[in-house]
Amino acid sequence: MIHSAKPVFAPSTLALAVALASAPALAQDGNRATALEEVVVTAQKREESLQDAPIAISAFSPAAIESMGIEQVTDVTHFTPNMSMHRQSASNATVNFSIRGITEPEPSMSVDPAVGVYMDGIYMARNNGLAFDVVDLERIEVLRGPQGTLYGRNSTGGAINIVTAKPSGEFEFQQNLSLGNYDRLKAHTIVDLPEFAGISAKLSYLYDTRGGWVDNETTNFQQGKADDFGEQDNDAWHVALNWTPTDTLSFDYSYDGTKGTGTPAAFQLTRAEAVPASVFGANFDPSLSFGPGANDGGIADSVLLGTYAAFGNQPVSGACSTDPSCVAFANTANPAFGGASPAQAQLGTFLGVYGNAAAAADEDRKDALNIPYAGQEDMDIQGHSLTAAWDITDFLTVKSLTGYREMELRHRTGLSGGGFLDLSASGGGVVTLFAAGAPNRKSHEQFSQEIQFLGDVGQFQYLAGLYYFNEEATEVTREQTAFLFGSFGTARSYDTDNSAWAAFGQLTWTPAALDDRLDVTVGLRYTEDEREITIDESVNGIAASQSFDENFDNTSGSLTFDYAFNMDMTGYFRIATGYKAGGFLSRTSIANQRPFDAETLTSYELGIKSQWLENRLRLNGAVFYSEYDDKQVTQFVPTATGAESTVQNAAAASYQGLELELIAIPMEGLTLNVSYGYLDPEYDEYSFFDPTGQFCGAPGTTCDVSDRGVFANAPENTASAGVQYDFPYFGFGQLSARVDVAYSDSYTYGTIENRFNDFVENDPFTLVNARMILSDISLGEAGNLTATLWGKNLTDEFYRQSGIGAFESVGFAGVVYNPPRMYGFDLDYRF
């Protein structure tokens, strides 16, 4: 087709993809912006101009990352239209991305994400560990809409490409030091070594430490240490090697890692109410004594047996009420329960005494909590990738992408949330709620191999390939409460072994009859998935183990018409499909385990990309409509033993929306960015399996609840704006000032309407970031300096990064809030 006649600059040039919130690629008059420059992306597995790519893409280059203060992949979500993310309450390292309202909030490693994340072309299979430090970034690309043809499975919402920096073959040294509030200290070192014997190397290291922003006031530590919530202490590194033995053959090796400790963000109760006995059992009363008789069954024995073991006592078989030592423990006053006995505190919790805790739950972000079970999180994430490219002929290149990654996460969840129990009626006084503590260990390793064949033949561009993937994962959790996950004394572990292979191809035809104005692209991918899981669980001394397996296959495709109206305006129409495998949710008990089916999505997108006013204004936009089939939904359901997570297939859903991006240089040195996203999802049919009859009227039945279905992490409106002004060079350095503002409509984390959703819903919020940069401070032959004053969330806005809004019968809701106002100073030295 007619491609842009403007020169294409290297990806390291300051870039804006179509996401208008990212800093633009600019032509310079001295050091001041005068016109937009071209941007190179690899979203379609080959280099091309951003404006020529018929996909809605947002890209962030190193200069954009620096000017906007982007530190992790999660930071780009606020500046990309129709994109958001949420963090897990139990882990600093686990995040879930949402693109166009399509997400998978389930943290279990047995459920696949809906947005694919890739680093240097290697798929990163799990949301666990995605909030790691990428030490040396070349750019980040966000692809919106299903990418089933080239990216394959688990990209129904879109894909995120992380591209690390390659060695330049020339010596360069960079040292960055950052200081900020909450005892922030970050030191970042990069050494680019000269080429030797055809081999180039680049080494990067990052140390990042920060104190917590929510005080933990507890003096009663059941386990772990009393760190404040949000603390982190990480070491990260990246090694990049390039070997080019000939002009037609090259090898790129990358090794990255992050090791760190910290305390997960605080989980805070926002609502707490009386818990009906119908859920937790009524075969006891919260009297001052516990023993045989009215108290010898149901939840009473389950709770106290688990509590007995949780306090370090030898587990007993059968029931607490049948073991004298357990009965004595249950009836003895314990400082952990404010002087009340475990029987008073634990049994009273589930019979309505807990209703007095409602006053302690707070919908506003707290600066201090009291959570005895808060504990440290340790993470160890490492990855290797090797890319080999061989230009066999002028029309054929063969690429091999080999990847291996491993992850180890250890953490303990503290879900007390600062709630309190009023046990005055039974003589216990007001005590800290001993609600939940769940030590957890996750390990994961994966291997992938992809072979690509690509090239140009006459009026055709082609790409074909084969793909193989295997992962093994293990998770062990000891859940010590009936409040959230089920009865006390529950332990669960699982092992997964998943494999997938695929064959894919994409062909682009540019017919000469239309003066190279039209591109027609057809893509097809066939995938097979094999899912195996073994679940081991022990509930109050009763052990069980069972294995499950299932196979899935799918054919995904895409069809794109891309037409150049002139050198500066292109329109496209794209039909694309995406696929996410089914399987089993590890967090569901064996007794209630039900397999869920694969989900598929078909999207229709009409877009335009244009440049105006002699390349001083760029306007891009897209409208889309997507249809879901067998959409997977994660939700809490009440069961006879407490609340459990399940994954169920909602039969049909649709999404429609639009995205607009504009960037302009109205005068020399001044750059304006504006973006807007609109999203309108709707359930057409929602087949819901109801184990209790709460929604369908009868236990164990299925009914349509589409009128009560809601979409998690799907704000209706998102917008961002940025202003950057580069002052005239004044001899000492180049001064730039930048302000970025991001807005999001309200959204919730629930999946079905209930009054507890109000307590995890986000109100509309606006974030304001600012940076003042003094660059090019010359030190003569010794190099140069850059000094930066920065602030994030300057208005100290708070919003909810994740939430659990369980059904009314469970009786609680809680959230994790975002970090507060952050500010600091950076000093960067380069030689």
Image (cartoon, helix red, strand yellow):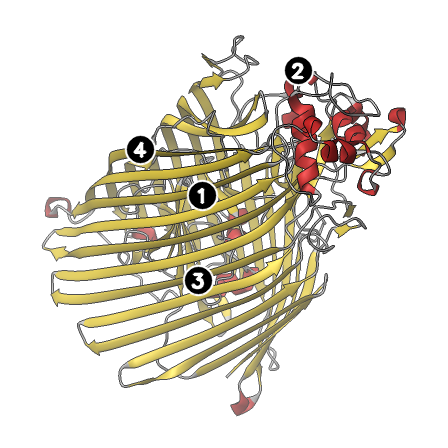
User: Which of the two discs, 2 and 3, labels the residue nearer the N terminus?
Assistant: 2
| Residue 801 image position (x, y, % from top left) | 61, 42
Q: Which residue is mark 4?
A: 550
Q: Give the structural element (helix, strand or loop) at label 4.
A: strand
Q: Check residue 151 in the rendering and tell me which mark sits there, or answer none.
A: none
Q: Give the structural element (helix, strand or loop) at label 1.
A: loop
Question: Eyeballing the image, is 608 above or below 198?
Answer: above
User: Which of the two discs, 4 and 2, labels the residue nearer the N terminus?
Assistant: 2
Residue 615 in view (yes/no): no
Rounded to the nearest angstrom, the CA distance separating label 4 from label 1 is 16 Å
Q: Are marks 1 and 3 in contact (CB under 8 Å)?
A: no
Q: Which residue is mark 2?
A: 278
Q: Between label 3 and label 4, give the one nearer the viewer.
A: 4
Q: Which residue is mark 1?
A: 109
Q: Are marks 4 and 1 in contact (CB under 8 Å)?
A: no
> What amino acid does circle 1 point to?
Met
Q: Which residue is mark 3?
A: 382
Q: Are marks 1 and 2 in contact (CB under 8 Å)?
A: no
Comparing 502 with 135, the one in front is: 502
> What amino acid does circle 3 point to?
Gln
User: Which of the two discs, 3 and 4, labels the residue nearer the N terminus?
Assistant: 3
User: Which of the two discs, 1 and 3, labels the residue nearer the N terminus?
Assistant: 1
Residue at 85 percent of width and 39 percent of height: 338
> What amino acid does circle 2 point to?
Ser
Quarter-of-image position of residue 436: top right
